[in-house]
Image (cartoon, helix red, strand yellow):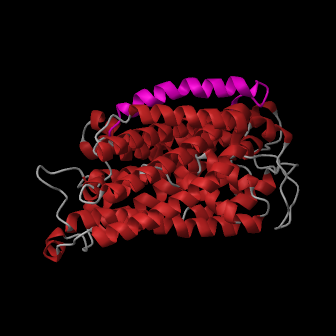
């Protein structure tokens, strides 16, 4: 159970948290920080609830796309695999971008050499040992992360001087419009995006029993909540210590590093080690998950695993290039969040046997329609198709002082479901007309004769399939 907790913890945390959580503290104050931390930690519990359901429906699988293939068919599985791989690509970009910015901020040195070394080392040990090595390193890195966070927090608490006269004027203890908007935006964004992260699903399927899985994700969610709250609090401390926004004003995303500049060099060294541990832990999981997803979903384990790993190695080169040109870590996450908010709700309809007539056509049309709905909303809201297109990329950020970001995250899931229902009605109409024309029975609502996956009891031990072993 401790292993499951450390595995989930290492997957859930990356070096990007050193930018995004302090930033939200400087913008939306305590309210925004609490919402962000809860929205990041609580969705992990969903894997303890949905994981056993999907494992029973697809006992030989090890990623979400395997259930999707059995439930909706090959075309829908490939569609989901595409978005899954795109999401992992964006997360890899965000991870490397965060690492090079951290090294530059803390040491003043070029972060590119550190990025290259991390890519080389993680590629070597994940290639030699697959996902099992990632499990082992997760345990080591997870313990290191917790230890360094505790030590760093104690040091910052002792060494940082708070100017109480700055607390009131900062307005960071007061609720705000953005803070209330985030109560909806962040849970939708993070919960749906977690579905695209194969690392979570691989750890879900690798868990020995349902009980271990539930306990593991529960412990991990508590630890994640504590760590994210502590790290995010650095934004508040930076403001109240007078080091942020500074002169000239600095972005809230570097509030933690502005605070660290006031502390002894050995504290900076601790934070740098923690950042590298966070980044390495997240990046090796992303690499392993990408190899497994590509091998299983795209090639059905028919292509040699070393060819897949070679492809992922080649992909790292554009990842590094894009990372060096992407200063906004948050925007990278937001792009994938909007896509997942469009795609995942229509996909999850099929989890219930009540909706056995919901098919892959509705999932694909609904997901793409959700993205289109964001464009339609943006065009109407801004009165400009160009700005409507830019809303898909959230170029104004999450913290714009209007309702555009909120509207986008409403339009994505609601629009996706509406497009899915429209696709369902169109398919039913077509099948009905075709049945009448051919003088055949209308079978669209016939329940499938075979249910996928044998029934399992709660504490059944799930054995990894031979294909899964080859893919990792």
What predominant SS class does the magenta segment belong to?
helix
Chain part drawn in magenta:
298-327
Task: Please say whether residue 117 is visible from this viewpoint.
Answer: yes
| Foreground of the two, 313 or 419 | 313
Q: Is residue 310 magenta?
A: yes
Q: Quadrant of residue 98?
A: top left
Image point (40%, 55%), residue name: 271
| Foreground of the two, 245 or 430 | 245
| Foreground of the two, 97 or 66 | 97
Residue 304 in percent (x, y) is at: 76, 24
- Position of the C terminus, as image quadrant, is top right
How many numbered marks appear? 0
Please state if 140 lies on the left or on the right of 355 as rendered: left
Task: Please say whether residue 180 is visible from this viewpoint.
Answer: no
Which residue is outermost to the left?
Answer: 247
- Position of the N terminus, as image quadrant, is bottom right
Image point (16%, 75%), residue name: 168
Residue 162 in percent (x, y) is at: 21, 72
Q: Is residue 1 magenta?
A: no
Residue 89 in percent (x, y) is at: 52, 35
Image point (42%, 49%), residue name: 16
Please state if 210 lies on the left or on the right of 223 as rendered: right
| Foreground of the two, 254 or 73 | 254
Residue 190 in percent (x, y) is at: 49, 55
């Amino acid at each position: 159970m401790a292993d499951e907790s450390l595995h989930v913890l290492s997957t859930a945390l990356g070096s990007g948290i050193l930018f995004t959580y302090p930033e939200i503290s400087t913008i939306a104050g305590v309210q925004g920080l609490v919402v962000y931390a809860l929205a990041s930690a609580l969705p992990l519990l969903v894997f303890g609830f949905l994981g056993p359901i999907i494992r029973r429906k697809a006992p030989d699988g090890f990623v979400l796309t395997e259930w999707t293939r059995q439930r909706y068919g090959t075309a829908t599985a490939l569609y989901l695999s595409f978005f899954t791989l795109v999401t992992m690509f964006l997360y890899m970009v965000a991870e490397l971008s965060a690492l090079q910015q951290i090294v530059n901020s803390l040491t003043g040195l070029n972060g590119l050499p550190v990025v290259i070394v991390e890519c080389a080392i993680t590629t070597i040990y994940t290639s030699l040992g697959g996902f099992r090595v990632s499990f082992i390193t997760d345990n080591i890195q997870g313990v290191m992360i917790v230890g360094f966070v505790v030590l760093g927090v104690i040091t910052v608490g002792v060494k940082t001087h708070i100017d109480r006269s700055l607390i009131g004027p900062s307005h960071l203890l007061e609720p705000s419009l953005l803070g209330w908007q985030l109560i909806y935006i962040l849970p939708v964004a993070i919960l749906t995006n977690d579905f695209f992260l194969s690392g979570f699903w691989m750890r879900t399927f690798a868990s020995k029993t349902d009980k271990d899985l539930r306990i593991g994700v529960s412990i991990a969610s508590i630890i994640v909540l504590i760590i994210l709250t502590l790290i995010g609090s650095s934004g508040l401390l930076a403001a109240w210590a007078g080091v942020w926004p500074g002169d000239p004003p600095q972005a809230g995303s570097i509030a933690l590093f502005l605070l660290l500049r006031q502390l002894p060099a050995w504290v900076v060294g601790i934070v740098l080690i923690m950042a590298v541990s966070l980044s390495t832990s997240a990046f090796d999981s992303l690499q392993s998950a990408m190899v497994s997803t590509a091998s299983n979903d795209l090639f059905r384990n028919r292509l040699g695993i070393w060819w897949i790993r070679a492809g992922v190695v080649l992909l790292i080169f554009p990842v590094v290039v894009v990372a060096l040109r992407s200063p906004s870590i948050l925007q990278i996450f937001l792009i994938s969040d909007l896509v997942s908010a469009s795609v995942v709700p229509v996909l999850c309809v099929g989890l219930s046997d009540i909706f056995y007539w919901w098919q892959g056509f509705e999932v694909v049309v609904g997901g793409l329609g959700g993205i289109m709905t964001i464009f339609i909303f943006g065009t109407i809201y801004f009165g400009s198709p160009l700005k409507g297109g830019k809303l898909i990329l959230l170029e104004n950020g999450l913290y714009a002082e209007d309702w555009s970001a909120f509207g986008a995250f409403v339009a994505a899931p609601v629009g996706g479901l509406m497009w899915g229902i429209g696709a369902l009605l169109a398919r039913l109409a077509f099948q009905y007309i075709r049945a009448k024309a051919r003088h055949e029975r209308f079978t669209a609502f016939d329940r499938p004769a075979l249910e996928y996956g044998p029934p399992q009891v709660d504490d059944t031990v799930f054995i990894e399939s031979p294909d899964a072993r080859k893919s990792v």
